[in-house]
Amino acid sequence: MPDLLIELFSEEIPARMQDRAAADLKSHVTNGLVEAGLTYAGAAAFSTPRRLTLAIEGLLDRSPTLREERKGPRVDAPEKAIEGFLRGVGLRRDQLIERDEKKGRVFYAMIEKPGRPAAEIVTEVVQDTIATFPWPKSMRWGDGTLRWVRPLHRILCLLTTEAGAEVVPVTVGNIDAADVTEGHRFLAPGAFSVTSFENYAAKLKRAFVVLSAEERAEAIWNDATNMAFASGLEVVEDKALLAEVAGLVEWPVVLMGDIGAEFLDLPPEVLQTSMREHQKFFSVKVPATGRIEKFVTVANRGTADHGATILAGNQKVLAARLSDARFFWENDLRVAKSEAGLSVWTDQLADVTFHHKLGSQRDRIERIAALARELAPMVGADADLAAHAARVAKADLQSQMVGEFPELQGLMGRYYSAVAGLPEDVAAACQEHYSPLGPSDDVPTAPVSVAVALADKLDMLTGFWGIDEKPTGSKDPFALRRAALGVIRLVTANALTVPLAKIFGENFWSADLLSFLHDRLKVHLRDEGIRHDVIDACVSMPQNDDLTLLVARARALSDVLRTEDGTNLVQGFKRANNILTQAEDKDGVEYSFGADKKFAEAPEEHALFAALDSAEAKITPAMKTGDFATAMQAMAALRPAVDAFFDAVQVNADSDVLRRNRLNLLSRIRTVCLQAADLSRLDG
């Protein structure tokens, strides 16, 4: 079985596109081969700044011959129908087979599709892949019509067997495939031929090209951390930057340089962000203090002076960038230290539109402040402090530093609040009120931060619901799903009692917004293994706007349903509910007037009365205190008595007195169980 090697050699591919491009090359080629009948044993894709590579092992040397039987018209069908069938199958009438069937004699065609050599199929698949490659952005160059991310220079396409290597005749525009590639642009610029993937990878390594992006990233990280460790320092981990830098070089050479002393007093986050965004540098910090003192850069080649010239150039450019950051920082500090303080920026937000139907950012700030004051008692925060924090939390949006680095919003607000002499709780809220931004983000716990964070997210939800700008399908331009998840995590992680229905008020959209939150809660709890129908059973209960209460009920019910008693009790409840519902529909009465023990006959009947008394004595007080675990366990404990009752007792007895009493007993089962959750909403 031959192995296939493909390399598409071009000008530099943007780092952000390389991983996706390698995956697309693999999927397009392998899918095309399989659809044409060529299966394979394994495939691996690689990318460097100048090449996409695909290696396929164990490819069939030709596609199998396929035979298909196709049913045609009856033998006595009109001539035009028979001629149409012949054209469709590409056969003559004397090549058809006749068979007797129930409705008469019918024509059949036996169509044989001969297999084709692998090289022929590979040619078609590779040419089609290149012509239709899904680059996010592409370009044309010269007189050709091919669109590629950057000018394509070479195509390497080889089928290798024990007998040797064969160039597959692929032609795209004015480029013909060959067995030739090139090494590093500067260190080994000459072309060379290869015979197999192993030969290709080895020759590339000798030509200063590391083919694997993972290998390049690992080498960069190991060299950087070892270099920093030798100086008693530590590299700030940044996986996204590591992946990007690995896509910028084919032969990574790690260098560590100094940051000018005049910049070391900038906040470490500013240094890190500026170096990452502008220079693609890693930050190197003092482990004990977090102070950033050096940087790591990755060159694409080694030099005779061991990178001294490269570092000198980098440090010069970095100084210019950090001078800008220092200028922003110093200007912002002057504003924060002024008599007016952060209110200078807050006032400017009156001229910044949040949404044309919801007013300016300043209008939004006032709404958040009012809501934070209302929420403060519910979260244990001082109302005045919460309102104050809300009024300054977004002030840094007008700062020069956040204008340059938007990702620092909130964090810079904390710095500026501290400089302005504001309380620590207010400064912390400036940074933390955006959290949580995602399912793995930390949840604020400081009361003032929680009040402002909740107010921020609830204002987003109520505001956009009020103007009918809700998420639709996959579209969520205002990140309202994220805001809803943030509300859920803030409330439940801090075990808060927040009456959302009261906060939403009697607006026409209130129920719909609460339902939206319940849907997001299902997604959130799914990771805990809590089924959606369990949440539905709890949402049907009173106080479903209290998310902490709702989650506690759902977790307790979910735990009970994982037990045998819980599962069987649900079936017993549903049986009781079905019998009772049918009887009430038939009789036109409601059996909810209380069963009387004096009419009980069977021991199992007496036992059920006793079990219900015992369960109710535990469930009722437990529900009042929100002790759902105790309530659910007491409910599950009914299972043996309910099972025994249905095994031994006929509900629809001949005696009307017994029948009515037993139906009322079933009604009591339903009533007792429904105190904990609406079990009728459970699946199954």
Image (spheres, rainbow, N blue to C red):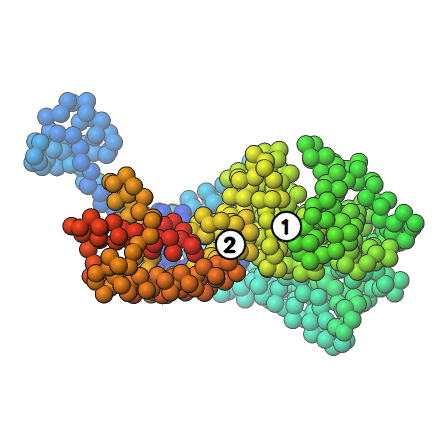
Image x and y of residue 422, in percent: 83, 56
Task: For label 1, count other residues whose C-alpha is less than 10 Å away and answer few (under 14), some (14-19) or many (20+).
Answer: some
Image x and y of residue 299, in percent: 71, 62
Q: Is residue 614 above or below residue 7?
A: below
Secondary structure at numbered mark 2:
helix
Q: Is residue 372 above or below residue 251?
A: above
Task: For label 2, count other residues whose C-alpha is less than 10 Å away and answer few (under 14), some (14-19) or many (20+).
Answer: many
- Res. 177 in view: no
Task: Identify the residue under disc 1.
Answer: 14
Image x and y of residue 310, in percent: 78, 62
Q: Earlier in the sequence, mark 1 or mark 2?
A: 1
- For the N terminus, the image quarter is bottom left
Q: Left or right: where does residue 456 sit relative to residue 19?
A: right
Which residue is the extreme one toward the right?
339
Mark nearest the camera among 1 and 2 is 2
Q: Nearer the viewer, residue 85 or 603?
A: 603
Q: Nearer the viewer, residue 156 or 290?
A: 290
**What label sits on residue 550 in the rendered view?**
2
